[in-house]
Image: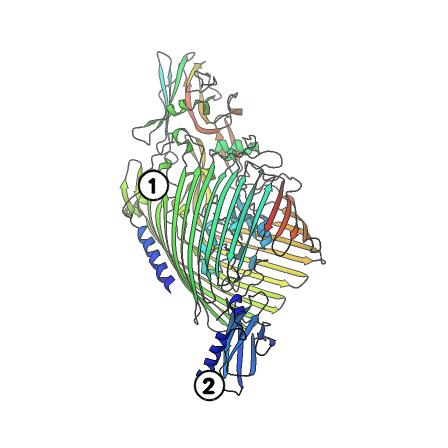
Amino acid sequence: MIFTNTYLNSIDVQKTPMLFFFLILLLFNSPIYSQDCNSSLTLKVIDLHDSSVLQNASIFVKELDKEVKTNFKGEYVFKDLCNKEYFIEISHEDCETIQTEVKVRNNTIKTIRMEHHLNELDEIIVKSNFKNKSQSVFENKISKQTLEDYSNNSIADVLKTIPGVSIISTGSSIVKPQINGLHSSRVLLINNNVKMEDHEWGIDHAPSIDINSIEKISLIKGAGALKYGGSALGGVIISETLKTKLIDSLYGKLYSSASSNGKGGTITTDITKTNSKGWYTRLQGTFKRFGDYNTSNYIMSNTGLSERNFSLKTGLNRVDYGFEVYYSFFNNETGILRASHLVSAQDIFRGITSGIPLIIEDFTYDISAPKQKIKHNLAKFNFFKTTDLGKFNFQYDFQSNKRQEFDIRRGDDRNTPSIDLELTTHSLSLDFDSRFSNNLNLNLGIVGKYQKNFPDPETGVRRLIPDYEKYDLGVYSIFDYKLNPEWIIEGGLRYDYTYMDVYKYYKTSFWESRDYGEEFSDIIVEVLANQILTNPKLEFNNASATLGSKFLFDNNNTIFFNYAMSSRSPNPSELFSEGLHHASARIELGDLRFKSEVGHNFGFTYQKSNEKFSLIFNSFLNTIKDFIVIEPVEIMQTIRGSFSLWEYRQTDAKLFGADLNVDYKLNKHINLIHQSSVIKGTDTKLDNPLIDMPPANIKNEIVYFNSDLNNLSVSLQSEYTFKQNKYPDNNFEVYIPTTETYEYIDLSTPPKAYHLLNFNSRIDIHTDKNKSINLGFKINNLLNTTYKNYLNRLRLYTHDLGRNFILSVKYKL
Amino acid sequence: MKFFKYALLASTLIFASCSDDDDNTPDPVNEEEVITTLTVTLDSGSDTVVMQYQDLDGDGPDAATVTVSGSLTANTVYDGSIVLLNETESPAENVTEEIEEEDLDHQFFYTVGSGLDVAAEYGDADSEGNPLGLSFILNTGVASSGGLTFTLRHEPNKPNTGLENAGGETDIEVTFDVTVE
């Protein structure tokens, strides 16, 4: 029983004749009630979310006028109590104080569950609703301050602050996170407990998430987090909104920032209303607008961005049950460097030879073709109930992702997208999380999913991704067991079944060149003049497993070890691509015969932390069987000249790497931070390096902080990126008839090493109990360095971003 | 547990409503922008030579068919004209008309390969007086042979002095082996 503050205040025995009368009644009705007071009361205080014991919780008993603290077991035993009701008040730092009444009868044992918020409002912690996502994999966390610093950017940009995470991009606005060298289909992105389904397979398809809708974000490298899926060969990114407190409150913030590069900015606001009964509502919205970005010395024409997003969350969060409705709408339009719209080998040669964009125009906010327009709707409903068995969570979620890609076209098609896809996903899940004993946790779940892809035929361009319906069923079981207070082991199994019902038009010539006719004649639905309509029905059975351990040497040293096997079904692009993909400037061919790729990942993390010093060393080895890669096979002649033809192929791969994060507190005011990472990826069948592996990089940062000077913080960061020396040679020679020469087209050679300096500062200019105003000033690429980034796919045609001054104001109430 | 019941009910409805179009097979896409066929007709009044590049499966694996109906006569003036077709559609779509409508955004270029003794000049202009190139005049010189390349650039810089500074994107780049006798 929990009383609200207001209710309790009104209950005062002396002043409430009704209650007094009630107590008298109780007295006569209770035969056990006696005058001898030999009873005892054992109070045990635990965390509502993960049932961990809360020691040092204060217990105040009104009748005894006595305050005590719980012991290391979270308990306190009161002796010599009478058999009657006692008013008690339990408080613990980071928790809402609970006031309740307890009936004592002889030897009573009572468990108090407290809502435990580990400084949740100030620091992002990776404590899920119930427990950590994984016990045997170190979880990287991003501070809320960092998250706010990247309000102007995307979710991938902020994840890059974690060592071992890089970004792979198409220009400066279409950016994807790459974890341990892997990205796209091999990285799962969980948004408010919903797995994002947003055509994530494409290298030029950025996550459809507003960074400002996220309040906490964590990252699990490798495939250890089976609950979210078995296909995360690279890792899992978990973004969430914060749980609200059980208090009557209204709070929110308004954040705006302006950037010199792109001459634009972001305005984002959110407001949250909570009450002590557990009801809450949060409304959030973002508006972003940028014009053409520039490098150190020229404008990158048609790189503007326009984004409008909002999200709404409402629900009830009670001690043992609750529900939540979450809806978010993401809507953006992104320009793609005009000069990168080159596909024939001759044109690409012109673009590369120039080194700077062939088209540089005056700055504009206009966004023209080539561009992308994305609309993503996400709706979620979940209900949870905590029983003696454990916590049940039921969830239904819906997503619709509309993706339109506009190319430079001719005639009536000028304003028609070349790609127009609508991906709709429904998903139902039931998750059960139980604490069998103090040492054993078990998490079981089942997920069903239905997905439909609709490529609009009105584009006048053959479908890049075919019509399909996909059904998924996944079941998982994960346990963790505490062998002793220092040693936790974790294990899990997951099984996923996927069924795809596809309608795909093949070009007759391609169908025949692949000899599909012999093997797949039964899937032909209709033969047209130069196309064949087929109905492939594909099934995939994927098993994944994890086994790991976490060992605490002492309070300061922890070791994590994890092995994970993961299986990923080929994605629609790998299976069905067939033709020119404008965004990658090449003809891409998939293969209907592909099977799932299976990865074995070993991860090891050593963490050391004390008051002055913290160190995280992380290393991994990932061997992947039937790894799907795309690589050039030949030069093809078309009416538009020579094209580079790329085919998907299954091979075996090995990736390994290590990263380091060191934070040293020099004195009260100065922190030194070092980060570095190195990754190597090899196609083991061909003994060739894998493409797009992040080059080694080193970051060093010095941070000055003074709480006496309005929380002034000033930092300078140096970021050094090495040249990637390991890369597959995909260069080719092509004959250019107009000059009658053979030219060497260098698509592969990575750009030179570069060094960037970044400056960041912030200060509170006004703070009181109710509101605060914070000013921020950043300079990215302080020295205006001219550089190219290997992992930016437009690097062939343009340099990367030049100096950027960013001013921000945050108003909190 | 009421929430469970309603949620299940709601989701069943949604699942049921989105799987009712199973028997519809998707329509084929008409490829509207593809140029499959380039035909160059050279007419001297007494003699006509037709050169054609045809690739019916576009970026598919089949190779194109390239034909030249005969050799050109030395020291002769030919009126040249270019016709572009999209033969994936039936009847074939005449793309030439689209180019004429968007004359400011297009320009043909003629590149004479070494060894071949011919010279081409523009025979038409766009609405701003810059060359378009669907019509041209070809003057043949002495007996020779070599490649004659036709390049169509989309959104070139206009005016320009040739392919070197034309920019834009290549829509067509086709070479014919030409003999002058």
> Along the line of sight, which residue is nearer the eye, A133 or A771?
A771
Q: Chain of mark 2?
A: A
For residue B112, above or below residue A439: above
Snapshot quadrant of residue B179: top left
Q: What kind of colouring is applied to the model shown? A: rainbow
Which percent across, then down, holds residue A283?
A: 49, 51
Image: A712 above or below A47: above
Say whether residue A554 is visible: yes
| Left or right of residue A674, residue A527 in this image | left
Q: Nearer the viewer, residue A223 or A471?
A: A471
Q: Residue at x 47, y 22 (%)?
A: B111
Q: Position of residue B21 (x, y in %)?
A: 29, 47
- Classed neighbour count for the residue bearing mark 1: other residues with Cα under 10 Å, few (<14), some (14–19), many (≥20): many
Image depth: mark 1 or mark 2 in front: 2
Q: Are marks 1 and 2 on the same chain?
A: yes
Please, what is the three-letter code of the amino acid marked with disc 2? Answer: Ile
Q: Can residue A207 be seen at all in this image of the molecule?
A: no
Label 1, on which residue?
A: A506
- Which of the numbered marks, if any, corresponds to residue A454? none
Count how many numbered circles sit on residues in the image: 2
Q: Where's residue A43, x and y in %?
A: 53, 76
Label 2: which secondary element: loop
Residue positioned most to the right: A667
Across and down, in percent, residue A201 comes to 45, 47
Against B123, residue A90 (above or below) is: below
Left or right position of A744 against A403: right
What is the number of the mark on residue A32? 2
> Which chain letter goes with mark 1?
A
**Number of other residues with Cα within 10 Å of mark 2, as a class: few under 14, some 14 to 19, many 20 or more:** few
Among all residues in the image, which is located at the extreme bottom? A36
Tell me which amino acid carries mark 1.
Tyr
